[in-house]
Image (cartoon, grey):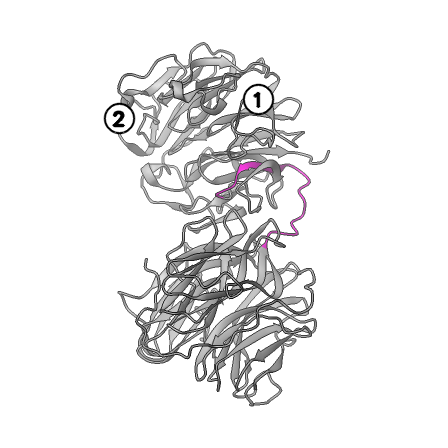
Amino acid sequence: MRRVGVVGVTMVLVAGVPLAGNPASGEPAADPAMSTFTPRSPVRVLDTRIGTGTGGSTSPVGAGTAITLDLAAQVPVTATAVVLNVTAVTPTAATFITVYPGGTSRPAASSLNLPGGDIRANQVTVALGADRTLRLYNHLGNVHIVADLAGHYATGAGGRFTALPPSRVLDTRGSTPLGPGGSRVLDLTGRVPASATAVTVNLTATNPTASTVITAWPAGLNRPVSSNVNVPAGDTRPNLVTVALGADRKVGLFNNAGTVDVIVDLTGFYSPDYGASFLPRAPTRVLDTRNGAGPVGAGGTIDVPLADGLPLTATGVVLNITGIDATAGTFLSAWASNADRPEASTLNLSAGQTAANAAAVAFGPVRGIQLYNLAGNVHIVADLAGVFAVVGEPPCTADCAHAWGDNSGRALGTAEAVFASPTPTPVAGLAGVRAVDGGSGSNGYALRTDGTVRAWGDNGRGQLGNGWTGGGSAVPVPVVGLTGVTAIAGSGDGAYALRADGTVWAWGAGWAGRLGTGGLDDASTPRQVSALADVVAIAGGWGTGYALRADGTVWAWGHNGTGALGSGSDVEFSPVPVQVAGLTGVTGITGRDNGAFALRADGTVWAWGDNGAGQLGDGTACPPSPAGCVSRVPVQVSGLTGVIEVAGNVNNGYARRTDGSVWAWGGNFLGALGNGVECDPTAGPCGSRVPVPLPGLSGVAQVAAFDFGAYALLTDGSVRAWGANSRSALGNAAVPDHSTVPVPVAALSGVSAVGGGSAAGYAIVPSPGH
């Protein structure tokens, strides 16, 4: 993918376009109403050239003048804000337009900036006045204004927003540009869910051979009389576009004149079944580099401070970003703090130009935005129009999932914009949970009592199972097409589900055949694992899946680099299930990073795969060559009998016995054994290659593991944890780095089940507060 640049454009634009004043002004903002979005095919609601929306007047808007736009006939009484594409047409002087709620003082913010004689559009998301009116102010000269309504926010039913890191979904450069009067259908199948009703995209027109306009609309409907991007010959111009989806998740794109290349970057979608609500704000200035910071230089970045006053569960914002007096042709990019800069642009500027573009920007694990400038020096102003946040969710009252630990990939599902949480927090909007598992990636999975599955976190390989790929979700989403599920198991970049009919289903990444379907392609919806029936239990390793059949045999598929298949073969992987060698009478299985454990009916434990840290538990040491430190067939873990449950992680195995005790083996990095022995890695490997008991831990009802430690659920409903705590995986803020002995997970009681993720923990509380 290439970034959109403007170096070498031929259009000469007037420098020194005035901008709205620096300080914020207007009335104190009332608490914003939690709102959802209803899209529509664009409809023209204002055109001062022909009198539309202005009481029949065809006069341009004069200098220092504001006109009123009454939208009472277009939006319901519950409407709180609207999305408009606002176009200023041939002003007689360089000017700016400000759109703001009717009945309020004009804020110190601008919505659209342009020089004299230009035609330019910008999408504006703006709160409505109490009587569903807006005011549109023109600073200098005379100018005609056109506005097209793309949808409205309102209290009540509607679509909620999932903000995404910018991803390029169309770039006609190097292929076929849009010709004069030409249309193209943009198919977003696989990029947004089937439930999506609308999307936000940054639409950029570049290399036009004639002055033209680009229109976006729901495919399958008549093309509306509206425009989204106005671009002169030879220029490059972007505009944020919120557009309803047509049939089959498609959007139409139309070019009026000449040929033009079109670049489309997807930044989010609306769906009625999950996402964040919108909290509209009167335009508020949050950044102005003219106030001391100085211009942003070539290749420079600047932070937009946003955390103050935003909900902790904010997932993104709508900003109007203005570049002022660029000294060279350049572009600006906006993206989440503490994330890699995307291959996408937000605003394109010619030398000497002042212009604005709206941006819907997703947050990462913190509530912050960064801005990047490609070339020259440019001042940057940002005005906040609203916040997307998960608010107003009904509290869970039964079988509630709680999460703690690492949240850098949003694996907690709490919607909180934090890197990590030491305090167990309810997973957002989730109730009726019977099992939770995180696997070894940045995801969480919940099996509900109704037999359906929810997922949250990363979705770069389709791990959410919701029918789309890219970005992720900070809140649970439905795994589509699955009912009657009795067990779930997370793994690296995906998960597995067991249905009541004995079949196994997989989704997410397909590398090394981990889906078990015979191929290597990713799957964003569940696919049935090949040739497996009568399955009674499943497990997931880093890149391997496991199934226990009713006849007591174990089957495996996927990665085999360290013998994780247990079949005795040294093949790199198997995309279909193969039988684990020599195992019968198995009653339970669990995966680990590069191998697995099996529990037999006689209470013994068997292990295969990597043995670099003693994970096999059979007392064998590594040979001189690390490559030989594996077992490709099951071996018995030494000295263990009466075992009723097994768990495993990167370097360890854990066994729960009938007497309620727990035994551990493998590495002891950061206290992962939990036996009170401190590891000194400078003195060489430390750990135990045979099981050792955890002293002082009894009455254990369940054991689960995370990457470098484990959890024990006690019969009294409390939870203990040990091992690494650098990302708060122990759920105990009093532990600085790690614990070599079990410590209480804070604020948890009455727990019925626990689960582990990469560096996160999960618990189910049947009756919170009781």
Height in image: 386 above or below 405?
Answer: below
Residue 441, position as x, y percentages in the image: 44, 38
Which residue appears farthest toward the top when viewing the image?
639
User: What is the secondary structure assignment of the residue under circle 1?
Assistant: strand
Of the two numbered discs 2 and 1 in the rendering, the one whose residue sits closer to the viewer: 1
Which residue appears farthest toward the right when viewing the image?
770
Q: Quick check: is 513 in the magenta stretch?
A: no
Question: Which disc number belongs to residue 570?
Answer: 2
Q: Give the residue displayed 57% in from the left and 30% down from the top.
A: 754
Q: Amino acid at mark 2?
A: Asp
Residue 689, position as x, y percentages in the image: 41, 15
- Image quadrant in which you'd find residue 403: top right
According to the picture, the residue beneath numbered tag 1 turns out to be: 742
Height in image: 260 above or below 577?
Answer: below
Height in image: 690 above or below 110?
Answer: above
* Quadrant of the snapshot with the N terminus: bottom left
User: What is the secondary structure assignment of the residue under circle 2?
Assistant: loop
Q: Quick check: is 399 in the magenta stretch?
A: yes
The one nearer the camera, 524 or 103, is 103
- The magenta span reads 389-409
Residue 426, position as x, y percentages in the image: 62, 40
Does residue 193 appear in the picture of this structure? Answer: no
CA separation in Å, label 2 and label 1: 38 Å
* Quadrant of the snapshot with the C terminus: top right
Q: Amino acid at mark 1?
A: Pro
Which residue appears farthest toward the front when viewing the image?
292
Question: Which disc number belongs to residue 604?
Answer: none
The one nearer the camera, 474 or 454, is 474
N-terminal label among 2 and 1: 2
The one nearer the camera, 471 or 323, is 323
Specify the principal SS of the magenta part: loop
